[in-house]
Amino acid sequence: MAEIKVWFIQCEPWEDIARKLESKYQEAINSWGLSKEGDWIMELWVSEEKGSWSLIQRALDDSACIIASGQGWEVLP
């Protein structure tokens, strides 16, 4: 079974998180959704090459938090 790593919640400007995910993990946004209240966005970042993934909660002021990350991402048919 793939390992899931839950971090202490790491928050910083969205641009900084995006830059790290792209350069260090070669992840890109795979999908996203707006909260029911419309005050934050949940983003799923994935590296199909490396199989890593990160779940990001992004506020409308462009602050963001890494909620969880892991390995073993697979696209289902």
Image: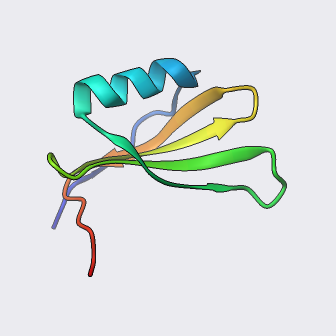
Q: Is residue 56 left or right of residue 45?
A: right
Question: Is residue 74 placed above or below 6 in the rendered structure?
Answer: below
Residue 28 quadrant: top left
Which quadrant of the rendered structure holds the N terminus? Answer: bottom left
Where residue 29 sits in the image (x, y, percent)?
43, 45
Residue 51 placement, left or right of 56:
left
Q: Is residue 67 above or below residue 51?
A: above
- What is the number of callouts on the image? 0
Q: Residue at the spot x=59%, y=30% of the render?
A: 64
Would you place residue 58 above or below residue 73 in this image? Answer: above
The residue depicted at 15 percent of the width and 46 percent of the height is 50
Q: Quadrant of residue 77?
A: bottom left
Residue beneath the point at 44% across and 27% down: 18
Say which of 24 and 1 sits in front.
24
Here the colouring is rainbow
Q: Position of residue 37 (x, y in %)?
A: 84, 55
Q: Residue furthest bottom?
A: 77
Question: With 17 as the anchor, is 14 left or right in this view?
Answer: right
Q: Which residue sits at x=79%, y=61%?
A: 36
Eyeballing the image, is 24 above or below 37? above
